[in-house]
Image: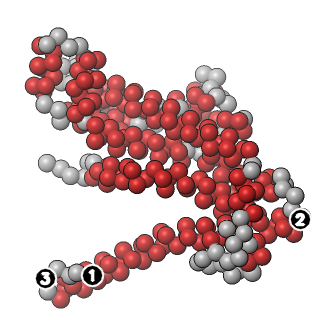
Amino acid sequence: MKFRESNVGDKIFDILVYTFVAIAVVVCVYPFIYIVSVSISSGAAVNRGEVWLYPVDLDFEAMKTVLGYTQLWVSYANTIFYTVVGTFLNMVFTCFAAYPLSRKSFFLRRRLNFLLAFTMYFSGGLIPIYIVVTGLGLYNSRWAMLLPVLVSAYNVMICRAAFESVSEELYENAALEGANDFVILYKIAIPVIKPTLAVLTLYYAVAHYNDFFNAMLYISDRSKEPLQSFLRRVLLQASMEIMQTTSLDMAALNQSTLQVRYVCIVLAIIPVLIFVPFVHKYLVQGTMLGAVKG
């Protein structure tokens, strides 16, 4: 630990900051280590309360049981579909919405920007949205997971601000060369704001991956159920549903129910742990969007 050259007050402040950061790291990391340890320990050791940090009596039976459950992989595939297709559609429609709103020559620019901001403070509410979705025949359809969240007003405003930061001379030169708005958007505007688009892609992808509320409202067919909805059902309602597919006796089933829940949590986190290191720098940039003025 290296303290900056300063007075006693500054050193005390630094010590407090490092202390709070260390506590925050422990609070965030310990639950994950505990869940992993429980998921690969023996059921007897878990029930005796011997597992509090590291695994005791390594036993991968719960892991094998969950990995052999077909519905887990169906939900995994559905989540990948919703995340990839949903994020692609989100970015396409966000760019198509933000670009004209950024152009001063667009005659509806001021009115549409006002309506866009208005939706951030006032919405129709959950029941009208549900009536619209079911009225369109989207209930139990994969589109019910994609269309209601097709565009985020907040993300459109971020994208619009990024388009506005592009030099107006670039647009004018391209127009003089004969490029129409679609060419200008695709070949000039989008390449210039790639860092912002990367951050928005991350925002949309994380939202789709963690989305269980829309599935709870609109999806009752388990063949279309996302991973987070499956995980919620296992955690809150039916971890025994998985255990009943095994040949374990009732005593072993009762011992392993908690482990099954924790194994499901670990399996749901793995894609995030693989994906986050590659987008970490964009995540840092994203936290700074809108925070730096001038």
**Nearer to us in this view, 66 or 94:** 66
Left or right, 230 with reference to 246: left
Percent coordinates x, y for residue 28 in the rendering: 48, 69
Percent coordinates x, y for residue 49 in the rendering: 70, 80
Percent coordinates x, y for residue 147 in the rendering: 52, 29
Residue type at mark 3? Glu
Quadrant housing the N terminus: bottom left
Q: Which residue is drawn at 69% across and 72% down?
A: 58
User: Which residue reaches farthest top?
Assistant: 178
Whole-number angstrom distance, CA of label 3 to CA of label 1? 13 Å
Whole-number angstrom distance, CA of label 2 to CA of label 3? 65 Å
Mark 3: secondary structure: loop
Report crowding for label 1: few under 14, some 14 to 19, many 20 or more residues within 10 A (C-alpha): few
Disc number at residue 1?
A: 1
CB within 8 Å, label 3 to label 1: no
Q: Which residue is drawn at 14% across and 48% down?
A: 294
**Nearer to us in this view, 92 or 109:** 92
* Marks 3, 1: nearer the viewer: 1
Left or right, 47 with reference to 136: right
Q: Above or below — where is 216 with respect to 47?
A: above
Disc number at residue 91?
A: none
Residue type at mark 1? Met
Residue type at mark 2? Met
- Residue corresponding to mark 3: 5
Pointer 1 or 2: first along the chain: 1
Q: Above or below — where is 91 with respect to 72?
A: above
Q: In which quarter of the image is residue 248?
A: bottom right
Q: Residue at x 18, y 50 (%)?
A: 293
What is the count of numbered marks?
A: 3
- Residue corresponding to mark 2: 250
Q: In which quarter of the image is residue 201?
A: top left
**Nearer to us in this view, 58 or 188:** 58
